[in-house]
Amino acid sequence: MGADNESRGALVVFEGLDRSGKTSQCGRLVSYLEGLGHSVELWRFPDRTTSVGQMISAYLTNNSQLDDHTIHLLFSANRWEKRSLMEAKLKAGTTLIVDRYSYSGVAFSSAKGLDFQWCKAPEIGLIAPDLVIYLDIVPEKAAERGGYGGERYEQLEFQRKVAQRYKLLEDSSWKIVDACQPLEDVEKQVKEIVLEHVMTCQKGKPVSSLWS
Ligand code: NYM
């Protein structure tokens, strides 16, 4: 894809509860876009490969204990350490499909009882997604899908609280897709929505910042 000033990649974020199908949908979407000849990369947060990401991973797997505020800021720092690379990729014409972003950060931490606005504050200034696909599933249905993996947060009662917090974060960049449908139906809808947004970004839609 072209890398002139007019044409840039799209920042497409997938959000949803644990076991809502984000990871499968992201993988399928990337293959589809690659097949159409787009420059595209799959990213995920937390990015466990960095040193901050390793601290987060140790926390999620119960190998370390951290204060709730501290882990919240680490999740945010993990996005900040990728911000300039993200901007460079988008400007060079690469579309980024991102499995979780700032919305997860706020939904999960505020579900623990942290102040909602406090949770949003460290995300201000990160690149705003062009599109957020929220894979909507009732927590009970998600829990039925082969069970949770045993990481921190993967409990039905907590996921119910997360779902309520997510609802408070919906904005005009969101498209809500019913994730209880068969995988193929979800995939078809996702492809249609994403293609439209990729085209809009190629036409020169400016990059904007959270949370405005
Ligand atoms: N999570 C993820 C947060 O609590 N805050 C964040 O900012 C992000 C990006 O990490 N249960 C939580 C949500 C998940 C967990 O994510 C690990 P994944 O997608 O299972 O690797």
Image: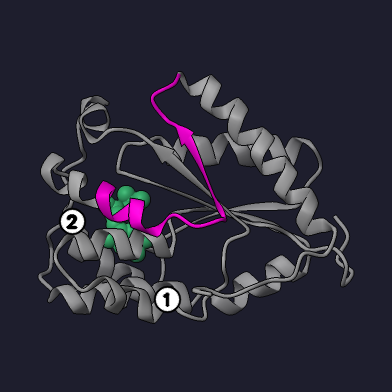
Spatial CA distance of label 2 from label 1 is 24 Å
Q: Residue at x 69, y 51 (%)?
A: 40
Q: Is residue 179 magenta?
A: yes
Q: Name the secondary structure under disc 1.
A: helix
Ligand 1 within 8 A of label 2's CB? no
Q: Is residue 164 visible?
A: yes
In this picture, residue 47 sits left or right of residue 13 = left
Q: Compared to 6, does 132 lie above or below?
A: above
Three-letter residue code for mark 1: Glu
**Residue 194, position in %: x, y?**
66, 43
First to last magenta residue range: 163-181
Nearest to the observer: residue 167 or residue 49: 167
Q: Residues within 10 Å of mark 1 (few under 14, many from 20)?
A: many
Q: Earlier in the sequence, mark 2 or mark 1?
A: 2
**Residue 17, position in %: x, y?**
31, 44
Read off the residue under disc 2: 61
In this picture, residue 143 sits left or right of residue 83 = left
Three-letter residue code for mark 2: Thr
Q: Residue at x 55, y 76 (%)?
A: 83
Nearest to the observer: residue 19 or residue 133: 133
Q: Is residue 150 magenta?
A: no
Ligand 1 within 8 A of label 1's CB? no
**Residue 11, position in %: x, y?**
62, 59
Read off the residue under disc 1: 123
**Figure disc tally:** 2
**Image quadrant where residue 16 sits:** top left
